[in-house]
Structures are given as C-alpha cells and as structure tokens.
Amino acid sequence: MRQLRIDLTKCNHGRDCAHECETACATKVFKVDDPKMAALHIRDNGDGTGSTILCDQCGDCVVVCPAEALKRNKLGVVMINKSLCVGCYMCIGFCEKDAFERNPDWVEPYKCTSCGICVKACPHAALEIVDVPEPAYRIV
Ligand code: SF4
Ligand code: SF4
Ligand code: SF4
C-alpha cells in the first residue's frame, strides 16, 4: 500500500509539508478555507523533538465504518466514498492517529490520500512515499 512516511530525525518542524498540503490539497481538493486544515500536522515539542499527526493508511477506520464508505483503492490507499458516508464520524473517533479532518460544510470527513505533493516540499527530504504490505485489519 502507498504510505506517507516521515523521518523525524531529518525534520526541523518547519512545516513546509503541511503548508504545501494546505495549499495543494486542503484548499483545492478538500475545500477548506483554513490554513490549519492540512491532512498532516507537524508539531515542535519544544525540546528539540517533533511529533506528527499523519495517516499511515492502517485501514482500521475501514473496519469501523458502518456504511462501507471507507475502502482501499487499487494503490492500497484508504479513500472515502462521499456518496455512501452518513456522517456518523465513528471513523474520526476510532482513528488512533487523529488523522481525519472535516470541512464543516461537508457530511464526510477527509484524510490524507498519499498523493505525495508534500514530499516534494520538504527541503530536508524527511518525507517519502513508500509501498508497503497492507496490515491485517484489527479485530474490533
Ligand atoms: S485515517 Fe486513521 S484509522 Fe484510517 S487509515 Fe488513516 S491512520 Fe488508519
Ligand atoms: S463518518 Fe462516514 S466514512 Fe466515517 S465512519 Fe461514518 S459513514 Fe463511515
Ligand atoms: S500526501 Fe497529499 S494529502 Fe497526504 S499529507 Fe501529503 S499533500 Fe496532504
């Protein structure tokens, strides 16, 4: 499956990636007019370390969605079928990585699509798109 990964030892928490996701994805694709609504977030912990909020395409939300609105596409990326989503937000509550965002005018939430646009924006080559085996779905 196509997965966005970050190497925090290379990351300087400059947020170029999040800015690129905001510009290229959040504003244009997810239609949120808010610069903080990127599909990834980089935090500076203030002690020299950083942390991320990032979808790793684990697929846990696929299992919990009662409307079968979440499915992997042929690249293994978890995508939302807008026409099936009923807006229950169980996926948001269930995602341990806190990786969903919401356009308040939309029923369906949105998440990282592993498009890779942010990868090119990082001046430290801390981000990459990798192809890894899909994990077995967790039993819920
Ligand atoms: S949104 Fe959360 S639960 Fe769903 S695939 Fe991404 S990390 Fe996993
Ligand atoms: S909000 Fe939509 S995608 Fe999320 S669990 Fe509910 S129906 Fe599924
Ligand atoms: S891969 Fe695309 S959707 Fe995901 S965080 Fe990067 S720019 Fe945003």
Image (spheres, rainbow, N blue to C red):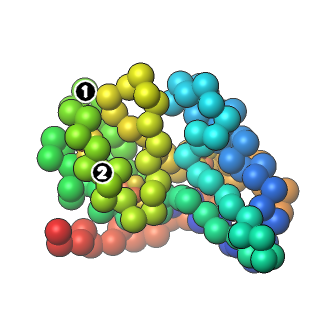
Picture quarter containing residue 9? bottom right
Measured along the vertical axis of the image, is residue 39 above or below residue 1? above
Along the line of sight, the residue nearer the viewer: 88 or 72: 88
Q: Which mark is residue 91?
A: 2
Along the line of sight, the residue nearer the viewer: 122 or 52: 52
Measured along the vertical axis of the image, is residue 138 above or below residue 4? below
Q: Position of residue 98 (x, y in %)?
A: 45, 57
Crowding at dot 1, Cα within 10 Å, few <14 / some 14-19 / many 20+, comes out as few
Q: Position of residue 138 (x, y in %)?
A: 24, 72
- The picture quadrant for ligand 1 comes to bottom left
Q: Which residue is mark 1?
A: 83
Residue that protrudes farthest toward the right in the picture:
123
Along the line of sight, the residue nearer the viewer: 74 or 11: 11
Q: Which mark is residue 59?
A: none
Give the residue type at disc 1: Ser
Asked if the residue at label 2 sits under 8 Å from ligand 2, the reply is yes
Give the residue type at disc 2: Cys
Regarding residue 22, the answer to whether it shows in the image is yes
